[in-house]
Amino acid sequence: MYHLILGRPEKSLIYAGKRIAYIEKHPERMKDEVISYIQSINNLIIACEHITNRHAEIERAIIKLQVLKEKFTLPENAA
């Protein structure tokens, strides 16, 4: 979000994508990092909304959230 606040959505998109890729590369850590994963996907979606022609990336991100919802339940204190 730092880069997005500074008006650099492309950099925000890059860092969110890196964080998502890291967590997906280490699925054994997903349980511990599910909140961070959701936040990264959210940041990616917001960055995409500020950059033209990124609708396909937003759709893929939403699918990731739907898949995540099927696999995990959030801790009660996560909301």
Image (cartoon, rainbow, N blue to C red):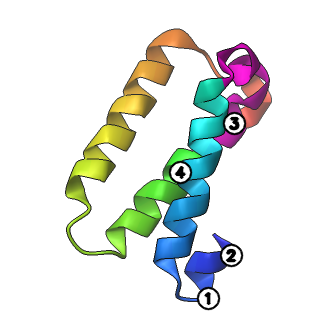
The CA span between labels 1 and 3 is 24 Å
Which residue is under mark 4? Answer: 17
Q: Which mark is residue 6?
A: 1
Q: Which residues are magenta?
A: 26-39
The CA span between labels 4 and 1 is 18 Å
The CA span between labels 3 and 4 is 15 Å
| Residue 12, picture quadrant | bottom right
Amino acid type at image mark 3: Ile
- Closest to the camera, between mark 3 and mark 4, is 4
Residue 79 in sight here: no
Amino acid type at image mark 1: Leu
The CA span between labels 2 and 4 is 14 Å
Query: Disc 3 or 2, which lies upstream in sequence?
Result: 2
Drawn side of residue 66 relative to residue 78, left or right = left
Amino acid type at image mark 4: Gly
Query: Disc 4 or 1, which lies upstream in sequence?
Result: 1
- Closest to the camera, between mark 3 and mark 2, is 2
Labels 1 & 2 near each other (Cβ < 8 A): yes
